[in-house]
Amino acid sequence: MTTAELLLQDYDIEVAMTRKILASVPEDKPDFKCHEKSMPLGKLTMHVATLPLFGKTILTTPSLNMADPGHKWPDQTFTTRDAALAAFDTNAADCRAALASLSDAQLAEPWKFSFGDHVISSSPRSLAYRHMCFNHLIHHRAQLGVYLRLNDIPVPGVYGPSADEPFNPK
């Protein structure tokens, strides 16, 4: 089994669970924040919806310099849940296709992430992808779960049952 095939096993599971959380995001609370230092719910939702685009960038480019004048992050403006889901579906499919296309040798190539002369990370592409896209996605998906709970919105089960989706054997 190739490295990409192994990573895709996890990817498909995590993307499906992330979509469940995004599908639960309320449309009427885009400005809700857990704390004054927290990201607003709408922006966090769009960050999660667009993170796979960052994964695609890691998988398809030799580096990313955020100080490059040509670099632009995707729009993080929340409009509707359906728009967030559509963005996520497109970005997740693009990231998956990029991952599926890579050989072990390509995943072992270095990938540099910087801001001007400041190097944020320089590691094998597979590690950069797992750390900066995959784990990052899981982290922010968990934050969305907290935002849902604080707004009395049922939290979908992710790695198993949740208080709102208990285990129900048939």
Image (cartoon, grey):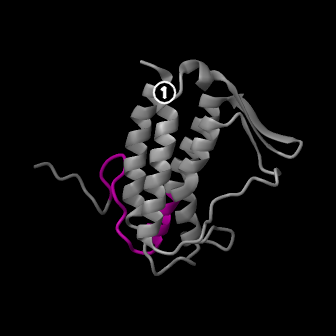
List the single residue furthest toward the bottom.
28
Does the magenta portion include 152? yes
Q: Magenta segment range?
A: 142-162
**SS at mark 1 in the image:** helix
Report whether residue 145 is seen.
Answer: no
Q: Nearer the viewer, residue 155 or 82?
A: 82
Is residue 10 positioned above or below 137 on the image?
above
Q: Which residue is at 49% across, 55% downward?
A: 142
Report whether residue 9 is seen.
Answer: yes
Is residue 53 positioned above or below 127 on the image?
below
Q: Which residue is at 46% across, 74% downward?
A: 80
Q: Which residue is at 43% across, 26% downward?
A: 5
Is residue 19 positioned above or below 44 on the image?
above
> Which residue matches tag 1?
4
The amino acid type, in three-letter code, at marker 1 is Ala
Locate residue 128, reporting x and y percent.
64, 35
Q: Quadrant of the N terminus?
A: top left
Circle 1 packing at 10 Å, graded few (<14), some (14-19), many (20+), is many
List the single residue furthest toward the front.
70
Where, by quadrant of the figure, is residue 120 drawn? Answer: top right
Locate residue 73, reporting x and y percent.
68, 58
Q: Nearer the viewer, residue 124 or 24?
A: 124
